[in-house]
Structure formats: structure tokens, C-alpha cells
Amino acid sequence: MKRSEINCYINDAIEFFNEQRFYLPAWAFYTPQDWQTIDPSHREIMDNMLGWDLTDFGSGAFLKTGLLLFTLRNGNPKYDTKPYAEKIMVVRENQLTPMHFHSSKMEDIINRGGGNLVIEIQGSTPQGEFSTENVALKVDGVSRLVKPGGKVVLTPGESICLEQGIYHSFWGEQGKGKVLVGEVSMVNDDTADNHFYEKQGRFSQVIEDEPSKHLLAVDYID
């Protein structure tokens, strides 16, 4: 992805967060120059990869296959004992996050506002294939069985709990607008715990066609 695109989509996300009255921490708005002058008190942000995260999953077509996230909090077994994580995301109409599951992370996906979130569900076999069995899960604490390939639509305020090994993909329902999506989970490791059904990258290669306005979490380790 071009850095100019990333800058544009982050600016758009900030406007959407403000419209939804979801407020980010002060360091979300630091410039690259600010990061060069901060003291060690900000170390957790970088060590645990908090902050902006934007990917097209290697598709080259962010609006069709992509996701914008902001990691608000996260643990890191190398540095601390925090066992949980939280993200906020912007999901556009028909913008697909590809089918994947997590081996370590259990998570709740929450529609925080805006449009409707469509989630497609598949169970997995020990070999990583799709299971033919129904998937048992909970929507806002209520048990539900979902057929393989079945879809759950979350309206604002609704949430779904996804245990380890449950394949899921999601997108914003057409005609309903962008969705403000929250995630509350166990510690998150996007470098190793995303198992895509079709092989693809988790992070985008960035083409530096203009200076960055805000660093991505992956920029901390570059």
C-alpha cells in the first residue's frame, strides 16, 4: 500500500471515531517526529505493538479486502503479565477480512456502532480444513449453533464470542454504512497467531510515496 493511502484512511478513521464518540489516547496522534523524542515511559506501546494497524492482506485492493485497526491495549509475555487485549476497527461496506482462525487467542467481536457487521463462520479440523460440523458459539452470552458457512449479523450493541479454531471472515453489510467494531481478547500476536484458510500476508508492504503522518505499529520495529 502507498503511504499516502494509509495517511488518508487513518484521517478518515479519526473522523469516524469522532462521529461515533469513540476517543483515542493522546499518543494516537503523535507524529513520527514526536516518537523520536519520547522517553522510556512509552516503551509498552512499542513493545506490545499498540496503535495504528492497516492492512490490505496483500490484495492490493484495500477497499475490497482490507482492515483498519487501532490496538488500544495488549499484553506481551516477554515484558509483562497483562493477559488481555483490546482493539477498535473500522469495517467498510463489503470490505472483506479474509477467512482465518486463531490458535491461541479467544476473542469477542463487538459492533460498537454505525452499520451492521456480517460474520461468516466455519469450524476447523486438526489439519486446518473446514469442518462439516455445526459450530457452537455464543452471541451476547446466548448459545447458538451455526451451520458451516453460516452468517451471523451483528447490529450495533451486539457481540459474538469466537473461541480458538473457529474460522471467521467479516465485512460491513451493504447499504448500512461503515461499522465501528471492537475486539476484546486474550493477548494478541498478529505476527504468529493468524491462520488464513487461503495463504496470504497479514501486514502490507508500504510504498513510501509521502511522509507518514502517524506511525503504524509495524513501523516501531522497522
Image (spheres, rainbow, N blue to C red):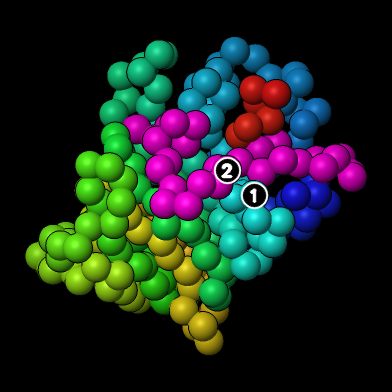
Furthest-left residue in view? 143
For the residue carrying disc 1, how many other residues have a C-alpha within 10 Å: few (<14), some (14-19), or many (20+)?
A: some
Furthest-right residue in view? 209
Q: CA distance from mark 2 to mark 1?
A: 6 Å
Query: Is residue 18 found left or right of 107 in the rendered image?
Result: right
- Picture residue at 52% right of the left edge, 21% below the top: 47
Query: Is residue 107 found left or right of 97 in the rendered image?
Result: left
Indicate whether residue 117 is drawn in magenta: no
In terms of image quadrants, where is residue 160? bottom left
- Picture residue at 34% right of the left edge, 32% below the top: 187
How many labels, in total?
2
Amino acid found under the numbered disc labelled 2:
Gly
Which range is magenta?
187-216
Residue 103 visible, this angle: yes
Q: Position of residue 46 (x, y in %)?
A: 57, 24
Q: Position of residue 179 (x, y in %)?
A: 49, 69
Q: Position of residue 29 (x, y in %)?
A: 68, 42
Q: Which residue is mark 1?
A: 58
Quadrant where the C terminus is found in the figure: top right
User: Between 107 and 70, which is closer to the camera in this rendering?
Assistant: 107
- Picture residue at 66% right of the left edge, 44% below the top: 204
Q: Which residue is mark 2?
A: 201
Answer yes or no: do the residues labelled 2 and 1 have beta carbons within 8 Å?
A: yes
